[in-house]
């Protein structure tokens, strides 16, 4: 029997992530009649809480042109980012009619106010905000967040008509720890040998975590890692860059493809919520406290978490250095206030330390990239000459 290839696994996975009807979740519901589904908005949600209750957690991360906006515009102001529109459109159009509960983290004004819009329009869905600590560095943050996780867990138990034991939570933490380990390995390959794993492939394989049961995603990652190991591509003469700006609204896949044609994206913040926790979560002790501690103290950074221990410009510089990158692409989604704000700080710091970078904006619904192709090719070629 011929061993499966990275291409075949990625093709299969791409079909799943590009289908706004969430086909894997529908299959799960057929296999679990009466099962409940919890959706959550970007950036991070402790999915272990839903998993331990036998509820399927799904990440809602927007859609490109596969989901035209027809109804959501009537409910959101014109200056709101695209991801908030497409998340609402998913449900209003009936494409995503699976939800029993939906949780918004209060990452920005748009997400905070979206919760009320959803609650008013979808009376059958339990819409909640998970109130994250404002000061992540405070000694009160872990106890506070543990209590907030407990409150959300009680809501999930209510929706699923069940009680969740600490043991069930620990089993779920194990499943997600395995997922985080596999994703770390995927990103290690991308950093160390980007010629063996393209940015688009890594993106598709990562994003799939949010649209299917995590056990199935672990299987896909194991198969993909085994197939990548069999690859022996040759390095090409390309600059290595870090992409910043994909923490919430996602750039279209075709845009990532344009970028990877010109350079190796050796690290990024695409779907950072799925990779937010950087180490295994402790499986002993109070599992809710362990999850809260991991969120606050063993985690990545993003423009929507304010933590004085993680100065964002320093974190970006560290990421560039750790990935061995020569340059950066500093992007922001159109109309994204937190992203555009950070873009200024990142760009200024990179100027100060002399790291070449390209500043750009994107929108999940864009479908022409010729201008971007020209810009990124010029950027990459000028650097190749400089470093030659
Ligand atoms: S893209 Fe920006 S403005 Fe829109 S929901 Fe995400 S963080 Fe908020």
Image (tube, helix red, strand yellow):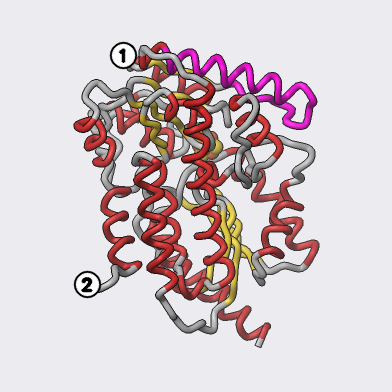
Identify the image quadrant of residue 197. Answer: bottom left
Quadrant of the image containing the N terminus:
bottom left
Circle 1 SS class: loop
Residue where numbered disc 2 is placed? 1
Q: Quadrant of the C terminus?
A: bottom right
Closer to us: 333 or 326: 326
Which numbered marker is on residue 346? none
Q: Residue at x 58, y 70 (%)?
A: 192
Magenta extent: 131-157
Which residue is at a point 39% across and 62% down the rendered structure image? 224
**For this view, does 266 lie left or right of residue 319?**
left
Please tell me how crowded label 1 is: few (under 14), some (14-19), or many (20+) other residues with Cα within 10 Å.
few
- Residue 346 % position (x, y): 70, 53
| Above or below 30: residue 245 | below
Judging by the rendered image, the residue that carries numbered circle 1 is 124
Assess mark 1: CB under 8 A from ligand 1?
no
Q: Main secondary structure of the magenta part?
A: helix
Category of crowding for the residue at label 2, using alpha-carbon neighbours closer than 10 angstroms: few (below 14), some (14–19), many (at least 20) = few
Q: What x and y, as percent, mark residue 110?
A: 51, 29
- Residue 335 seen: no
Q: Secondary structure at mark 2?
A: loop
Q: Residue at x 62, y 31 (%)?
A: 284
For the residue with label 2, is its CB less than 8 Å from the closest atom of ligand 1? Answer: no
């Amino acid at each position: 029997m011929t061993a499966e290839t990275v291409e075949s696994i990625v093709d299969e996975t791409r079909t799943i992530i590009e289908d706004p009807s969430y086909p894997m979740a529908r299959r799960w519901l057929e296999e679990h009649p009466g099962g409940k589904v919890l959706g959550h908005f970007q950036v991070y949600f402790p999915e272990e809480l839903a998993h331990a209750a036998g509820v399927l957690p799904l990440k809602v991360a927007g859609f490109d042109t596969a989901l035209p906006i027809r109804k959501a515009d009537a409910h959101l102001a014109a200056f709101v980012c695209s991801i908030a529109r497409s998340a609402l459109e998913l449900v209003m159009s009936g494409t995503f009619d699976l939800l029993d509960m939906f949780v918004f983290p209060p990452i920005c004004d748009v997400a905070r106010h979206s919760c009320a819009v959803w609650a008013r329009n979808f009376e059958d869905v339990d819409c909640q905000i998970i109130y994250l600590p404002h000061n992540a560095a405070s000694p009160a943050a872990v106890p506070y967040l543990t209590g907030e996780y407990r409150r959300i867990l009680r809501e999930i138990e209510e929706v699923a008509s069940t009680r969740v034991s600490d043991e069930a939570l620990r089993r779920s933490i194990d499943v997600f720890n395995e997922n985080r380990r596999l994703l770390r390995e995927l990103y290690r390959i991308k950093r160390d040998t980007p010629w063996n794993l393209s940015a688009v492939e890594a993106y598709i394989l990562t994003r799939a975590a949010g649209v299917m049961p995590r056990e199935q995603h672990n299987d896909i990652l194991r198969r993909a890692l085994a197939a990548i190991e069999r690859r022996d591509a040759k390095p090409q003469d390309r600059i290595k860059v870090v992409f910043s700006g994909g923490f919430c609204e996602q750039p279209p896949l075709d845009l990532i493809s344009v970028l990877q044609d010109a350079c190796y994206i050796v690290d990024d913040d695409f779907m950072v919520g799925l990779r937010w926790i950087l180490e295994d979560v402790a499986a002993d002790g109070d599992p809710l406290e362990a999850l809260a501690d991991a969120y606050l103290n063993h985690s990545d950074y993003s423009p929507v978490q304010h933590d004085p221990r993680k100065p964002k410009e320093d974190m970006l510089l560290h990421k560039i250095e750790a990935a061995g990158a020569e340059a950066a692409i500093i992007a922001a989604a159109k109309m994204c206030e937190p992203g555009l704000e950070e873009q200024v700080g990142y760009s200024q710091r990179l100027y100060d330390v002399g790291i070449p970078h390209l500043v750009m904006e994107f929108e999940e619904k864009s479908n022409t990239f010729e201008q971007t192709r020209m810009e990124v090719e010029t950027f990459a070629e000028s650097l190749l000459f400089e470093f030659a």
